[in-house]
Image (spheres, grey):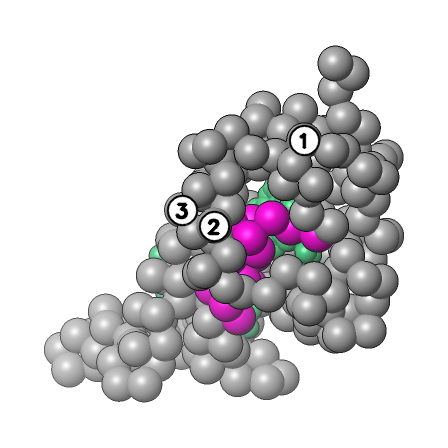
Amino acid sequence: MTGAVTAPRRWDPLVRLTHWSVAAAVVINRLVTEGGSQAHVWIGLAVAGLLALRLVWGFIGPVEARFSSFPPSPGRALAHIADIRAGRHVQHRSHNPLGALMAYALWATLAVTIASGIAMTGLPPKIHAEGGEGPPAAAATAGEAGEEGEEEGEDEGEGEGEGEEGAAEEIHEIAANLLLVLAALHLVGVAFETRRSGRQIVTAMIGGGDKPKEP
Ligand code: HEM
Ligand code: HEM
């Protein structure tokens, strides 16, 4: 297989749809919406739905999309690194073994982000006033509590940031930051693989086939 470029890779519509909507939602929730606001929570829950859809697709979708085509395997990842170092070009039908590890890492981190978010809001989600867009009644109560006495006033600062919810908040923040770090590494990986293999892998994720560069 070395050096041989076979059929161009094409991702099916569900993989493309879930990829780009999850990517957009993560960027929006990390950089645009206010943490805990109504928009933030609903976008986060939409990501949960898209992730669930993609994970089911990993069992029943077309062969390239199946987990069995890109198992998480450190051994294969090391072999892939050896291929890169030796300048060998091995064709992989689905994600290459390093890309596969990144896909699982991204999905796992997304799952932790979503689960910790839900741990804070419950289901159906209760949007807190601290989230920025809480219901006016709740905001008013929080305000009054602050004025009523020192004890409540102090409570307001940390409020529900203690105990279980505090832990969930901490985990949520760490996971959301890790998600951005992984996404940045993912982009480096995509750029590197495009350059190394000459295959248009981004085009394949957008909708066309990934045509190899003509020699
Ligand atoms: C795409 C996934 C998500 C990302 C990238 C994300 C990211 C973030 C970030 C960066 C913060 C601010 C953390 C801080 O500085 O304190 C935050 C806060 C928050 N997020 Fe998310 N989030 C996501 C999904 C969710 C989901 C699914 C829920 C709930 C169902 C949720 C509920 C919250 C809440 C309640 C806060 C406020 C925490 C506080 O009180 O400080 N998030 N999120
Ligand atoms: C926060 C942003 C992003 C996240 C969370 C993310 C996540 C993922 C995941 C989970 C996969 C595996 C897809 C699957 O099998 O369903 C993937 C693949 C891919 N992503 Fe992203 N992605 C992000 C941004 C981007 C961007 C901006 C680009 C384009 C420059 C991109 C290009 C690709 C490509 C080309 C693949 C397929 C790689 C291959 O051929 O093996 N991603 N991404």
Q: Provide residue 41's location: percent of width, then percent of height.
A: 57, 66
Is 101 a magenta residue?
A: yes
Tag 3: amino acid: Val
**SS label for mark 3:** helix
Q: Give 34 or 186, whichever is nearer the viewer.
A: 186
Q: Is residue 86 left or right of residue 199?
A: left
**SS label for mark 2:** helix
Q: Is residue 135 left or right of residue 69?
A: left
Q: Is residue 161 left or right of residue 17?
A: left
Quarter of the image for the N terminus: give it.
top right
What residue sits 83% from the left and 44% below the top? 10
How far separated are the C-alphas under marks 1 and 3? 32 Å
Say the numbered circle drawn on residue 3.
Answer: 1
- Toward the top, the furthest residue is 215
Say the numbered circle drawn on residue 79.
Answer: 2
Question: What secondary structure do most residues of the magenta stretch adopt?
Answer: helix
Residue, disc 3? 181
Give the magenta part as a residue range. 94-111
Tag 1: amino acid: Gly
What residue sits 77% from the left and 69% below the top? 57
